[in-house]
Image (spheres, rainbow, N blue to C red):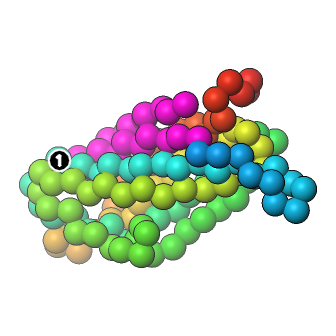
Amino acid sequence: MTAELESLTNKIQVSVNSEFVTKLTEQGTPLFVFSYTVNIENKSDQAVKLISRYWLITDGEGKEMEVAGDGVIGKQPVIPPKGHYQYSSGCHLNTPFGTMQGHYNMHTQKNDSFRVSIPIFQLAQPYCVN
């Protein structure tokens, strides 16, 4: 199952595509692995730098986990005007479905800071009732 959602904040468009990868068992506990690909499009007339990220991950039982840190996948990319940046990452849940949402903190060339919303998207094992 894949799902694509997008949002637009301050002329920065974020689209996310998620996919179920596999089900594992770790010490007798099921572990559901998901991947997601994020495309960040800069529709403004100036370069922006992605400084940090924040994720709120919620599993199918309502348990929440927050993840925050510098950049994405070890990088703080500068996205040129009318340019884009794409990366893939993943997460795991103890349930076959859940959601992710969050935001990026960015700076403009003039060092103005702003927050870009990442739309809430679903993580779901195929044929899973939620």
Residue 33 position, x and y percent, is 64, 50
Q: Quadrant of residue 55?
A: bottom right
Is 25 placed left or right of 107 in the picture?
A: right
Judged from the image, the secondary structure of the residue bearing numbered disc 1 is loop
Front residue of this view, candidates 94 and 110: 94
Q: Which residue corresponds to the image point at 32% horizontal and 41% vertical from the top-left?
A: 8
Q: Which residue corresponds to the image point at 48% horizontal and 48% vertical from the top-left?
A: 36
Front residue of this view, candidates 5 and 25: 25
Q: Residue flagged by tag 1: what amino acid is it?
A: Lys
Q: Which residue corresponds to the image point at 42% horizontal and 49% vertical from the top-left?
A: 37
Q: Main secondary structure of the magenta part?
A: strand
Residue 24 position, x and y percent, is 74, 52
Residue 104 position, x and y percent, is 41, 60
The reply to whether residue 82 is visible in this rendering is yes
Q: Quadrant of residue 21?
A: top right
The reply to whether residue 117 is visible in this rendering is no
Is 100 placed left or right of 13 in the picture?
A: right
Q: Which residue corresponds to the image point at 31% horizontal and 55% vertical from the top-left?
A: 86
Residue 61 position, x and y percent, is 81, 42
Quadrant containing the C terminus is top right
Residue 2 included in the magenta stretch of the image: yes
Magenta span covers which residues?
1-20
Task: Find disc 1 in the rendering and name its residue.
Answer: 43
Quadrant containing the N terminus is top right
Q: Is residue 123 above or below residue 72?
A: above
Residue 34 included in the magenta stretch of the image: no
